[in-house]
Image (spheres, rainbow, N blue to C red):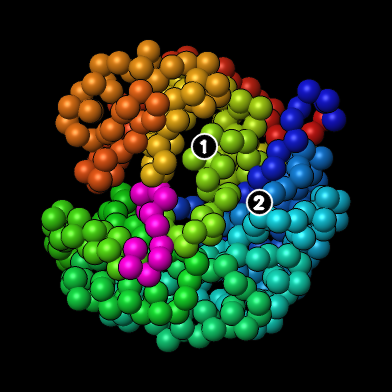
């Protein structure tokens, strides 16, 4: 391996299969047909082999899709392969702060899978609950029920998972504030360490978007969505949680370390179709198609469809936009050390305007969103994006020599 290439501490593995496509989902995924899954897993194993020498993981994240849709046999083979390719993984698992997350759908959790995951070192589960109301789950196109979610949570606890995240969606068509509060209270009572809450978005080319266009559903008003978000913050704060990122709250010390690294602009390797990564200053994405992904790896070609190195100014802008999502905001000295630029030199007018609009706070040392700014975070982030020339390449930035 090239000695100038840094070791990477964070790995994302994308499993692009689902039992069914949810009505709101625009992410790339496919039905889990056994032959396609097997061919995909063989290709994924080869990609992992190519990047393994770069890795000494402190966090791993299995996302999708639905990683837990894999059978026990498939999961065991994938987990064993990771252990075999990354010799340091066994010792890392026992180290303080190690985090290995798997995203799970309540319909695909079983005691056997839960025990298997724990045995291989997976210690954090992110469960796509979305709601504890069956009517709303059906409206979203979810394949599980509220009872299945409750049973899955108990199963994970029994298997030894003591770090659980629940995902929820709010501002669902027809959802009332009472239904949202009942779901939140039920979630808190089940003792998670982390909650992720997302306002429903209507993505192009999804069933829910088409229903909206056909007036089959009605979008909840902005004021109602804001009130739901604020009520969530109130109830969770009373239970000891704190908001650390716009959509994420956690008990102290249970923030998602993998995502924190991404928001802070750290390196991470992504493997699997449509997976993204950021390594040695290069941002890349793998081809978002299983057939193309598998074919390229079988031909011993890198599966990337795009890799670029941002200019220093553009990288600084992207870093600022991501970092502002966190409640801690941007510490000016650390930002200058990481990028070589001062915040108030790159964006003097934009920062002045945002302060005047009471969307950000700036004391010369730290830049943070205000509570109002968090509600308009995407708009604020746009003020920091710098469009500049980029350098592209055809190789896989994370491949070891």
**Residue at the location (68% across, 65% down)?**
122
- Residue 360 drawn at (x, y percent): 27, 33
Residue 62 lies in quadrant: bottom right
Magenta-colored span: 237-247
Q: Nearer the viewer, residue 41 or 355?
A: 355
To which residue does mark 2 refer?
Answer: 59
User: Where residue 264 is drawn, which disc sits there?
Assistant: 1
Q: Secondary structure at mark 1?
A: loop
Badge 1: how crowded within 10 Å, few (<14), some, or many (20+)? some
Q: Nearer the viewer, residue 51 or 55?
A: 55
Q: Is residue 227 left or right of residue 85?
A: left
Please say whether residue 212 is visible from this viewpoint.
Answer: no
- The residue nearer to you, when weighing 329 against 314, is 329
Please say if 205 is above or below 117.
Answer: above
- Residue at image position (83%, 25%) is 3
| Image vertical order of residue 127 relative to residue 28, above or below | below
**Residue 289: % across, % down:** 56, 48
Residue 236: tell me if it is visible. yes
């Amino acid at each position: 391996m090239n000695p100038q290439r840094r070791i990477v501490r964070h790995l994302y593995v994308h499993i692009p299969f689902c039992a069914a496509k949810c009505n709101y989902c625009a992410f790339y995924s496919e039905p889990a047909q056994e032959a396609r899954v097997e061919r995909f897993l063989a290709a994924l194993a080869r990609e992992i082999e190519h990047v393994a020498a770069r890795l000494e993981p402190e966090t791993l994240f299995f996302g999708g899709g639905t990683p837990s849709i894999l059978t026990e046999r498939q999961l065991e083979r994938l987990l064993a392969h990771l252990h075999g390719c990354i010799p340091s993984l066994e010792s890392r698992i026992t180290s303080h702060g190690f985090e290995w997350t798997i995203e799970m759908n309540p319909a695909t959790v079983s005691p056997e899978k839960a025990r298997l995951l724990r045995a291989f070192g997976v210690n954090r589960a992110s469960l796509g609950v979305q709601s504890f109301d069956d009517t709303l789950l059906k409206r979203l196109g979810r394949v599980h029920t509220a009872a299945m979610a409750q049973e899955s949570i108990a199963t994970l606890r029994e298997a030894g998972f003591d770090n659980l995240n629940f995902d929820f969606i709010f501002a669902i068509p027809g959802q009332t504030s009472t239904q949202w509060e009942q779901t939140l209270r039920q979630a808190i009572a089940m003792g998670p360490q982390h909650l992720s809450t997302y306002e429903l978005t209507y993505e192009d080319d999804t069933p829910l978007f088409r229903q909206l266009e056909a007036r089959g559903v009605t979008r909840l008003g902005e004021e109602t969505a804001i009130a739901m978000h604020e009520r969530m913050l109130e109830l969770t704060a009373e239970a000891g949680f704190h908001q650390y990122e716009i959509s994420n709250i956690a008990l102290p010390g249970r923030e998602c370390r993998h995502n924190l690294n991404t928001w802070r602009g750290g390196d991470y390797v992504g493997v699997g179709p449509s997976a993204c990564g950021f390594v040695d200053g290069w941002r890349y994405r793998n081809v978002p198609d299983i057939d193309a992904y598998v074919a390229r790896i079988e031909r011993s070609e890198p599966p990337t469809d795009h890799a670029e190195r941002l200019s220093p100014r553009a990288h600084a802008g992207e870093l600022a936009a991501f970092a502002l999502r966190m409640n801690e905001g941007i510490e000016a000295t650390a930002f200058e050390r990481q990028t070589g630029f001062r915040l108030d030199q790159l964006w003097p007018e934009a920062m002045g305007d945002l302060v005047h609009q009471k969307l950000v706070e700036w004391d010369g040392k730290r830049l943070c969103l205000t509570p109002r700014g968090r509600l308009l975070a995407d708009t604020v982030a746009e003020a920091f994006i710098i469009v500049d020339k980029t350098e592209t390449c055809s190789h896989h930035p994370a491949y070891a020599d």
